[in-house]
Amino acid sequence: MRFLFLLYGDEQAEAALSPAERRMIVEHHMVLSERLAQEGRVQSGEVLQASTTATTLDRTSGCVTDGPYAETKEQLGGFYVLDCADMDDALALAREIPDSPGLRIEIRPVDTA
C-alpha cells in the first residue's frame, strides 16, 4: 500500500540553521532514502523550493497569486511516496524521517481505485 508523507516545517527557523546543521539534516535524509530505495519502498520523493516561489491558482475565481495557498508558519517543504504495509508501518517510517525545525508529517494513504 502506498502512503504520501507531506513534510511541513518552519522555513524561517530552517533558514536560521547553520550550514553544518542543514548539511547534517540533508545527509540523514539521503541515508534514509538510500535504505528505503534498497528495500524497494520508495515510489517518489522530492525537496521543494521555498514557499515564496509558489504560485496559487484559485479555480473558482481564476485569480492567480504569488505564494502558497495557506498563510501559516509551517510550509510544505517536501514529500515522500512510500510503500508501507499499513498505517502502523507508515508511522514507524515517519518516526525515522530526520527532524528539522517545526517538522510535522502528514501521512495519507494513496487512493489506488
Image (tube, helix red, strand yellow):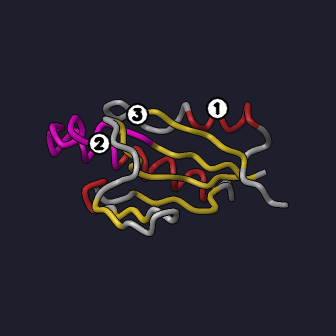
Magenta stretch: includes residue 13 = yes
Is label 3 in a helix, a strand or a loop? loop
**Residue mark closest to the camera, 3 vs 2:** 3
Q: Give me the residue at 29% from left, 42% from top.
A: 24
Dot 2 amino acid type: Met
Proximity of marks 1 and 3: CB atoms separated by less than 8 Å: no
Q: How far is the residue under mark 3 from the one under mark 2?
A: 15 Å
Is label 2 in a helix, a strand or a loop? helix
Q: Give me the residue at 56% from left, 51% from top.
A: 35
Magenta span: helix, strand or loop, mainly? helix
**Residue 43 left/right relative to 17:** right
**Residue mark closest to the camera, 1 vs 2:** 1
Proximity of marks 1 and 2: CB atoms separated by less than 8 Å: no
Dot 3 amino acid type: Leu
**Residue 51 left/right relative to 13:** right
In the figure, 9 relative to 33: above or below?
above
Sooner in the amino-acid sequence: mark 1 or mark 2: 2
Q: How far is the residue under mark 1 from the one under mark 2?
A: 21 Å
In the figure, 65 relative to 96: above or below?
below
Crowd band around label 1 with a 10 angstrom C-alpha radius: few (<14), some (14–19), many (20+): few
Crowd band around label 3 with a 10 angstrom C-alpha radius: few (<14), some (14–19), many (20+): some
Which residue range is magenta in the image? Answer: 8-26
Q: What is the number of the mark on residue 92?
A: 1
Disc 3: which residue? 103
**Position in image of residue 16 (x %, y %):** 15, 37
Dot 1 amino acid type: Ala
Disc 2: which residue? 24
Q: How far is the residue under mark 1 from the one under mark 3?
A: 16 Å
Proximity of marks 3 and 2: CB atoms separated by less than 8 Å: no
